Image (cartoon, rainbow, N blue to C red):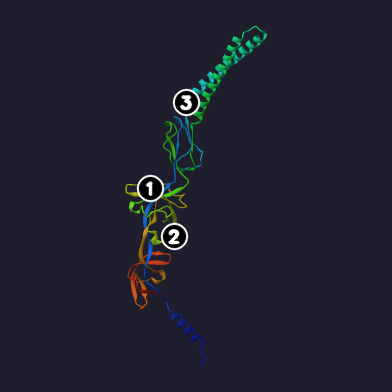
Amino acid sequence: MRPTPLIAGLACVLFASAAPAAEIVVKPASVEDWKAVFATVEPVRQLVARARIGGTIDKLNVKEGDEIPAGAEVATVVDEKLLLQMKVSDQRIRSQAAQRDQAKVDFDRIEELKRRGVSSQTQLDQARTALDVAERTLAAMQAERGVIEQQMKEGVVYSPGAGRVLTVPVSVGRVVLPGETIATLAEDRYILRLRLPERHAQIMHAGDPVRIGARGLGSDDLKGKGEEALRTGRVRLVYPEIQGGLVVADVEVEGLGNYFVGERTRVYVTTGRRSAIVVPAAAVYARAGAHFVRLKDGTEAVVQPGEARDGQIEILSGLQAGEVVVTP
């Protein structure tokens, strides 16, 4: 008798269900241990716009939070004394120019008389000397005026670089001194600054990977969303000085431009390697609030799962090295 299609289909199902499951021998593996810490967002460099002359703030062009380019006018400082000095200098220059013109007329007249034989060489030399002195004095006065003019130009405070304005500790009408801070800026590039116990100084190096959690101070991202939800950065610099028992390191990561300077965020750093038992994530299943794995002899073992890593899951308890786990 020929088998019916239904019987043939059941035979295929039974044959498939009888296919052997994959067997994995449990043995310790070396895994990286990740530690959750907090890092602060800081600029690579903090820039300071300072007044170059003393005077009164006449105009203030920026406020906290503004994004400004390099060379932008931040403020204008005016010193009334410089205006008075400029007026005095202009009057002196006009007076000296008149003396120079008179000395030139005298020199030309004596030179003509000397050519006619009426004037002496001594008188000609004296006139030439008087003209030279008048011209040099006029040049010196013009140079002094240039100094005053340059000082007035230095009343404009320029941004030393592109960035975001953090603080503006002055206001219009306030008197400032040379070198006083007009505004502080955070450079466009931001980094994460870590401060870890000094025992990590020997295992942290430039170029080490760092995982950055979601923005804010929420729950543990490694246990919540998994590794794929984390961004990755690199240790840019490990400072050679330990401050207050802490080693300081800078982490470079993309996409920090919209963070607040000083904002804290959760990051994960590797603190070395350790031995752990890991099994494929597919081998662990949950039932009634507990987690199980199936052993080769058909029994179920209750396990405590840990962190998931690249399709593998760490088993904290419930399995011993040498046991054989089967996966569906």
Q: Does 185 appear above or below 129? A: below
Secondary structure beneath dot 3 equals: helix
- The x and y percentages for residue 115 are 66, 10
Q: Marks 1 and 3, how far apart in space?
A: 49 Å
Front residue of this view, candidates 300 and 68: 300
Q: Residue furthest right?
A: 116
Badge 1: residue crowd in 10 Å (few <14, some 14–19, many ≥20): few
Q: Residue at x 61, y 10 (%)?
A: 121
Identify residue for label 2: 229
Q: Quadrant of residue 317?
A: bottom left
Find residue 80 and name its label. Answer: 3
Amino acid residing under circle 2: Ala
Badge 2: residue crowd in 10 Å (few <14, some 14–19, many ≥20): some
Q: Which label's residue is closer to the chain start, 1 or 3?
A: 3
The quarter of the picture where the C terminus appears is bottom left
Q: Residue at x 61, y 13 (%)?
A: 107
Q: Residue at x 51, y 86 (%)?
A: 5
- The x and y percentages for residue 48 are 44, 39
- The x and y percentages for residue 129 are 57, 14
